[in-house]
Amino acid sequence: MRVVSTLALCLVLAFGLAACENEPDAIDDLNDASFELVNHEGEKVVVPDDLKGNVVVMGYIYTSCPDYCQLLMANMRNAYEELEGPDDVQFVSVSFDPERDTPEVMNDYREAYRADGAEWEFLTGDPETIDAFMDRMNIHYEISDTLDSDPENYLINHTDAITLIDNEGRVRDYMNGSRTPVDMLVEDINALREEV
């Protein structure tokens, strides 16, 4: 009887260790969070709840950005096209400049990047929620002093990142937004798609 118990315990431990080894490496599990944002059409989007079920490719931008955001958007756009807009991948661009990036402004930006598929959301929100969301996503930004003197040509120093979130709402990877090769981005997106 003791042998059976020991054997059973060994099997349980072995199964448990194998299950742990097969668990994905999550950087952060967003399932304990709820951020109410607004999309480019003025509709409420709750992150992560409304994005679950899809692999999420999330970039962080402001529409007046003269450099990195444009490169990040080009990378996301190229990955979107290479994947042929699959219905199991949700592309998301979130502004950390909500006072200027209203839903209307985000919609114009979306159209300029030909990101008009249902698989691509452009999100903004109230400043407090955006601050909390960016903090949770480890995105740092600081608006320069030039905004008051030149509101048309201001700069925001910010993290240049694309975040990959799996279909269960877990952050799985941070990539350099403007410099990651598109083929690497597509490869990592496909790896998450294959886990399902």
Image (cartoon, rainbow, N blue to C red):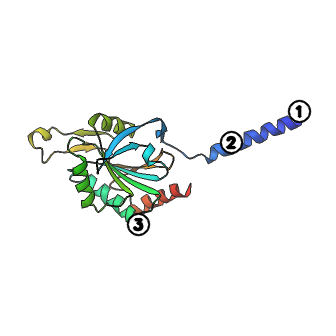
* Label whose residue precedes the other's in the sequence (2 or 1): 1
Q: Which mark is drawn over residue 82?
A: 3
Secondary structure state at the residue bearing disc 2? helix
Closer to the camera in the image, 194 or 176: 194
Q: Amino acid at mark 3?
A: Glu
Q: Amino acid at mark 2?
A: Leu
Cβ–Cβ below 8 Å for labels 1 and 3?
no
The percent coordinates of residue 82 (x first, y second) are 41, 66
* Label whose residue precedes the other's in the sequence (3 or 2): 2
Q: Residue at x 10, y 43 (%)?
A: 150
Q: Amino acid at mark 1?
A: Arg
The percent coordinates of residue 95 (x first, y second) are 28, 46
Q: Residue at x 88, y 33 (%)?
A: 2
Q: Residue at x 54, y 45 (%)?
A: 25
**Vertical arrangement, residue 166 with respect to residue 119, above or below:** above
- Residue that badge 1 annotates: 2
Badge 3, how many Cα within 10 Å: few under 14, some, many 20+? Answer: few
**Vertical arrangement, residue 6 with respect to residue 165, above or below:** above
Furthest toward the left, the residue is 149
- Residue that badge 2 annotates: 17
Please tell me in which quadrant of the rendered image residue 114 appears: bottom left
Q: Quadrant of the C terminus?
A: bottom right
Badge 1, how many Cα within 10 Å: few under 14, some, many 20+? Answer: few
Q: Residue at x 42, y 63 (%)?
A: 183
Question: Disc 3 and disc 2: Cα gap in Å?
Answer: 37 Å
Cβ–Cβ below 8 Å for labels 3 and 2?
no
**Vertical arrangement, residue 1 with respect to residue 75, above or below:** above
